[in-house]
Amino acid sequence: MRHGVSGRKLNRATSHRLAMFRNMVTSLLQHERIFTTLPKAKELRRWADWMISLGKRGDLHARRQVMACVREKETVQKIFAELGPRYQSRPGGYTRIVKAGYRRGDASPMCLIELITEAKQPPRKEKAKKPAPVQAEEASATPASEEKAQD
């Protein structure tokens, strides 16, 4: 039984899988978007969210944990200097997966995984309610009052 076992094996040995995800999370955090297969992207999302959450903490232990996974010092500095402060107010969900069709050779589902940018969107304008029904009630009320006035 698989109680409490999480993660995808992706038909790879453990060492190969860990090395692949370390390389992928490094590339994602460097370039902020990569193109990969959908199952890899869904698993990579867990790794990327974990690295950015450590970057938000910003202490020495978090830096050492990131360096155990991401082996490039420039990327580690980017996590703590740029990405951690960028997502400080966000409680999670730092990545977006956009499906991009199927690969030509083996028809595997492909996608684009990218870091979410905190672009402020303009507030939505509520549609103004038509004043016509209100005027119709007033119009129907005024002839009745005029009839009473004429009597």
Image: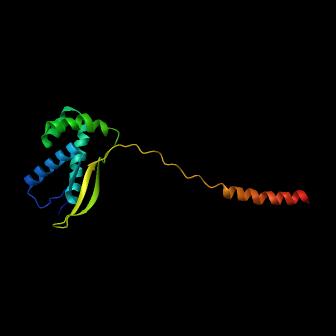
Position in image of residue 140 (x %, y %)? 76, 60
Which quadrant holds the N terminus?
bottom left
Q: Looking at the image, can residue 6 be seen? A: no
Identity of the residue drawn at 24% across and 51% down: 45
- Classify the position of the C terminus by image quarter: bottom right
Q: In this view, does 27 lie to the left or right of 83?
A: left
Colour style of the rendered protein structure = rainbow
| 51 over 17 or under it: above or below | above
Q: Residue at x 7, y 52 (%)?
A: 15
Res 7 quadrant in image? bottom left
Point 67% across, 58% down: residue: 133
Q: In this view, does 121 lie to the left or right of 107?
A: right
Question: How many numbered circles are shown?
Answer: 0
Tell me the residue at 69%/56% (across/down). 134
Q: Which of the pair 102/10 is nearer the observer?
A: 102
Residue furthest toward the front? 104
Residue at the farthest top position: 60
Whether residue 44 is situated above or below residue 55 in the rendered picture: below
Residue 130: name its quadrant.
bottom right
Image coordinates for residue 60, horizontal then vertical, percent? 19, 32
Residue 27 x/y as whole percent: 18, 46
The answer to whether residue 82 is seen in the rendering is: yes
Q: Position of residue 67 (x, y in %)?
A: 14, 39
Residue 150 drawn above or below residue 84: below
Left/right placement of residue 15 relative to residue 112 reads: left
88 and 115: which one is in front?
115
Q: Outermost residue, right direction?
A: 151
